[in-house]
Amino acid sequence: MLKFTEDHEWLNIEDGVATVGITDHAQNALGDIVFVELPEVSADFNKGDDAAVVESVKAASEVYAPISGTITEINTVLEGKPDNVNSSPMDDGWFFKMTVADASELESFMDETAYGEYVAGLE
């Protein structure tokens, strides 16, 4: 189940675990990604907490925990290839995986169609 946030993050939820990254819109706005700081595996986050940092040639930006849960895996490939966020934001450029502590938090997120309309309204 693919969901999107107003902070331009995507979540792909499978079997109670959410894979999290930033959207194509977000990586385009940031420009060339040069560094990604990932959270620690087993770290606990509440929805909205700062979970990661992405730096580009333009700016640094926080990546928020879109839900409450525990980090189960991080994409260590990004430490050496942060540009994967630019070239493949929804495949190779994912940031971390986390448990879904409260499934009701997912109800406020958008599906792909609604997110496309949201982004179109920003332009």
Image: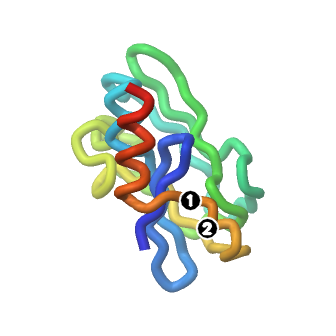
Residue 101, given in percent of the width and then of the height, sits at: 71, 74
Quadrant containing the N terminus in the rendered view: bottom left
Horizontal arrangement in the rendering, residue 68 relative to residue 89 (left or right): right
Disc 1, SS: loop
Amino acid bearing label 2: Leu
- The residue closer to the viewer here, 64 or 33, is 64
The span from disc 2 to disc 1 (Cα, nearest Å) is: 6 Å
Q: Which residue is mark 1?
A: 109
Q: Is the C-beta separation of discs 2 and 1 under 8 Å?
A: yes
Q: Which residue is mark 2?
A: 106
Residue 83 vertical placement versus 16 (above, below): above
Label number found at residue 84: none
Q: Residues within 10 Å of mark 1 (few under 14, many from 20)?
A: some
Amino acid bearing label 1: Phe
Disc 2, SS: helix
Residue 49, given in percent of the width and then of the height, sits at: 73, 47
- The residue at the point 47 percent across, 26 percent down is 55
- The residue closer to the viewer here, 41 or 113, is 113
- The quadrant in which residue 2 appears is bottom left
- The quadrant in which residue 119 appears is top left
- The quadrant in which residue 82 appears is top left
Horizontal arrangement in the rendering, residue 66 relative to residue 4 (left or right): right
Horizontal arrangement in the rendering, residue 36 relative to residue 91 (left or right): right
